[in-house]
Image (cartoon, rainbow, N blue to C red):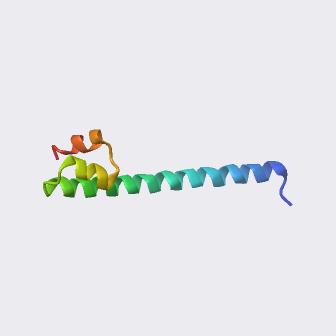
Amino acid sequence: MATFREDAEEFRKDAEEFRKDAENARQKVKEGQIGFARTMLQNGEPIEKVLSYTGLTKEEIESMEDL
């Protein structure tokens, strides 16, 4: 039978793993948004449309225009 301390440590480890998984998922979403925005910009879409479709900020999109 596990002690309270052991249970707490296991919970902490599970929470840290969940946090890392969530961060990785957010990063993958951001990479997808950037890729989609890049394609839209390369196809001549206006920034306003890219903003609306991707959820990126204007600053993020403007920094990509040079790419």
> What residue do we see at 20% from left, 56% from top?
40
In the rendered image, the vertical position of residue 9 relative to residue 43, given as above or below: above
Q: Where residue 26 sits: x, y (%)?
A: 44, 53
Counting the numbered discs, the total is: 0
Q: Where residue 16 sits: x, y (%)?
A: 60, 50
- Residue farthest to the bottom, as pictured: 1
Lateral position of residue 2 relative to residue 33, left or right: right
In the rendered image, the vertical position of residue 7 relative to residue 64, given as above or below: below
Q: Quadrant of residue 17?
A: bottom right
> What residue do we see at 41% from left, 52% from top?
27
Name the foreground residue: 9 vs 59.
Answer: 59
> What residue do we see at 30% from left, 52% from top?
52
Q: Which quadrant is the N terminus positioned in?
A: bottom right
Lateral position of residue 22 relative to residue 13, left or right: left
Lateral position of residue 22 relative to residue 16, left or right: left
Q: Where residue 33 sits: x, y (%)?
A: 32, 55
Q: Where residue 56 sits: x, y (%)?
A: 33, 47
> What residue do we see at 35% from left, 50% from top?
55
- Residue farthest to the top, as pictured: 59
